[in-house]
Amino acid sequence: MTPIIPQENTSNQPHSSLMGEDGSWSLFTTFFHIGLFTIGGGYAMIPLIEAKVVDEKQWISREDLLDLMAVAQSCPGIFAVNIAIFIGYKLRGMTGALMSTLGCIMPSFLIILAIALFFRQFQDNEWVARAFRGIRPCVVALIAAPTFKMAQTAKIGWTNVWIPVLGAFLIWMFGVSPIWIIVAAGTGGYLYGRLVNVK
């Protein structure tokens, strides 16, 4: 299976809801909303992206999201920013990439700036500590839920379920970089495809 690299729409025709001057602003507000309610890191953003970009806006398909996630994970940098850049570029080129990235990082920048300004006032606040102890387990659920949906989209079955299981085991047990897992899986998929075509 050949990896899909996000490319700008060669027809220069973005999704109908993104056409016109308000298209870039719509990307900014959508990713601002996603960034504002993402707690727990880039992977916690996946269900929000799926809900807003795939289900509600229908800008991209689940298959496209899965491919873009694989590319974003393989590239250097922050996963959340990478996925915002790829989706924005796919939808509206360089302008879309810029607006989606700004929308993604702006909420966390403003919140962290506010926390830095007033950190000393509530760093030892017991109520804040309790709130975060309750939030952390929810992040696990936010990451786990879309995993099962993506497994269906990727057509994971009894014949290939060993691939994600082995990959997860190598990352968890031996600390293998996800990049090497993706490279190995991509190479294996390519060789398997060539072998099937030869037959």
Image: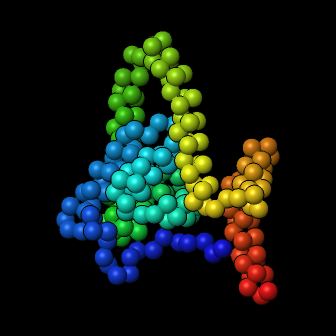
Percent across and percent down for residue 102 are 34, 52
The residue at the far front in this view is 158
Percent across and percent down for residue 101 are 38, 55
Question: Where the C terminus falls, by quadrant?
Answer: bottom right
Residue for point 38% across, 45% down: 34
Q: How many marks?
A: 0
Question: Where the N terminus falls, by quadrant?
Answer: bottom right
Residue for point 56% across, 51% down: 149
Specify the quadrant of the image occupied by residue 193: bottom right
The residue at the far bottom in this view is 198
Would you say residue 123 is visible in this rendering?
no
Specify the quadrant of the image occupied by residue 195: bottom right
Residue for point 37% across, 40% down: 36
Locate residue 130 relative to residue 117 in the image: left or right: right
Q: Closer to the camera, 74 or 53?
A: 53
Residue for point 79% across, 43% down: 173
Specify the quadrant of the image occupied by residue 151: bottom right
14 versus 120 height, above or below: below
Colour logic: rainbow
109 versus 82 height, above or below: above
Locate residue 149 relative to residue 194 in the image: left or right: left
160 versus 29 height, above or below: below
The residue at the far top in this view is 126
Percent across and percent down for residue 31 are 36, 50
105 versus 187 height, above or below: above
Percent across and percent down for residue 96 are 33, 64
Would you say residue 134 is visible in this rendering?
yes
